């Protein structure tokens, strides 16, 4: 006997000729389903993916795989772009979910013939870079030399100012370029009261970047997100004594790891001589030295100078 958990596709699933012992309809968290079925005997649990709250977040599916005998679960996918992206399907396979289909008529077959890894291995790209930029034809055709820059900003010392800096850079760049700003695994952007700033978890961030084919520049506040979302990364260091000492105590090899990378001193009070001393003591090279900046200004020459140093040649300061 089987269980059906449905939402959007309730009618379609109800039309199947299956032995059903229990059927529920609505939106549920993974924990809701655990509470209902942890001590319930069934042959297969057939899950309409839209019945799972936050189903576009692959972590939700990972929780499902952890809490259920996933070999007994069959998932009917919906037609959303995220769920049908190659990255999402690859991640499904990576978390051990093999029994999924977009075709409701395939469900009776999967009940008797569940997929093995071999059946779905083609969906998994172990070498896939989730941040590979898919450029739209409209942009590429207009400008064959178009290269989208996805620039990540990562705090190396605590609270080094990545979120505010991304906000200021977007505000200045958007006068000259088509720009998108995105923060990963955080919601601090909401405090700037700017609806053009976007926030997303890792999986949705990957999709947003891939689908933003019109943006010439995407600025990413990485937080704990993976760096391979970006074509380049700027590493922010606030060069105060306490911040630096704490950083080095936590990881005394941090500047060895940052060797050859683009280090920017942010919220810095160092002069040129201090910067040279910093480089000597840390064994690193500083790409740029940014002072404290007033985020309320619509035009800040220091911000524009930094953008020019990053290679944005359209800026006329």
Image (cartoon, rainbow, N blue to C red):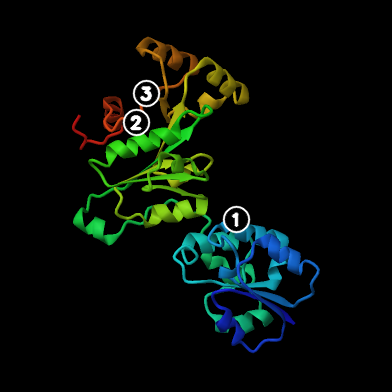
Assign a secondary structure to mark 3: loop
Assign a secondary structure to mark 2: loop
Residue 282, image x and y in percent? 49, 18
Report how far apart the C-alphas of labels 2 and 1 lie in the structure. Answer: 37 Å
Residue 130 appears in the picture as rendered: no
Quadrant, the N terminus: bottom right
Residue 138, image x and y in percent? 25, 60
Q: Which residue is mark 2?
A: 296
Q: Residues within 10 Å of mark 2 (few under 14, many from 20)?
A: few
Is residue 140 placed above or below 282 in the rendered structure? below
Tell me if 235 is positioned left or right of 57 in this view. Answer: left
* Tag 2–tag 1 contact (CB < 8 Å): no
Residue 223, image x and y in percent? 51, 39
Mark 2 vs 3, N-terminal side: 3
Q: Quadrant of residue 174?
A: top left
Disc marking residue 59: 1
Q: Residue at x 51, y 71 (%)?
A: 78
Tell me if 127 is positioned left or right of 13 in this view. Answer: left
Report how far apart the C-alphas of labels 3 and 1 lie in the structure. Answer: 37 Å
Q: Quadrant of residue 230?
A: top left
Q: Residue at x 44, y 56 (%)?
A: 207
Q: Which residue is mark 3?
A: 290
Mark 3 vs 1, N-terminal side: 1
Q: Nearer the viewer, residue 186 or 273?
A: 186
Is residue 142 placed above or below 312 in the rendered structure? below
Is residue 301 placed above or below 56 in the rendered structure? above
Q: Residues within 10 Å of mark 1 (few under 14, many from 20)?
A: some
Report how far apart the C-alphas of labels 2 and 3 lie in the structure. Answer: 16 Å
Is residue 305 placed above or below 93 in the rendered structure? above
Assign a secondary structure to mark 1: helix
């Amino acid at each position: 006997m089987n269980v059906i958990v449905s939402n959007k596709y309730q009618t379609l699933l109800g039309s199947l000729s299956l032995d059903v012992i229990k059927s529920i309809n609505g939106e549920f968290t993974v924990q809701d389903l655990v509470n209902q079925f942890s001590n319930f005997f069934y042959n297969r649990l057939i899950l309409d993916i839209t019945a799972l709250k936050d189903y576009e977040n692959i972590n939700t599916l990972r929780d499902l795989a952890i809490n259920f005998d996933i070999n007994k679960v069959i998932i009917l996918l919906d037609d959303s772009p995220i769920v049908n992206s190659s990255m999402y399907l690859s991640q499904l396979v990576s978390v051990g979910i093999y029994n999924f289909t977009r075709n409701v008529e395939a469900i009776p077959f999967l009940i008797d013939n569940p997929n093995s890894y071999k059946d779905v291995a083609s969906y998994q790209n172990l070498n896939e870079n989730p941040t590979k930029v898919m450029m739209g034809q409209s942009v590429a055709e207009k400008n064959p030399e178009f290269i989208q820059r996805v620039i990540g900003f990562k705090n190396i010392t605590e609270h080094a100012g990545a979120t505010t800096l991304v906000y200021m850079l977007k505000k200045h760049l958007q006068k000259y370029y088509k720009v998108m700003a995105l923060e990963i695994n955080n919601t601090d952007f909401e405090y700037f009261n700017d609806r053009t700033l976007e926030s997303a978890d890792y999986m949705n961030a990957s999709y947003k970047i891939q689908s933003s084919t019109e943006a010439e520049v995407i600025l990413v506040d990485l937080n704990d997100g993976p760096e391979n979302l970006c074509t380049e990364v700027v590493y922010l260091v606030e060069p105060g004594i306490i911040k630096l000492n704490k950083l080095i105590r936590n990881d005394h090899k941090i500047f060895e790891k940052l060797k050859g990378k683009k280090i920017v001193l942010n919220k810095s009070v160092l002069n040129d001589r201090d910067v040279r001393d910093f480089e000597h003591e840390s064994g690193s090279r500083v790409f740029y030295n940014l002072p404290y900046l007033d985020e309320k200004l619509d035009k800040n020459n220091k911000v524009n100078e930094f953008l020019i140093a990053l290679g944005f040649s359209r800026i006329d300061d």
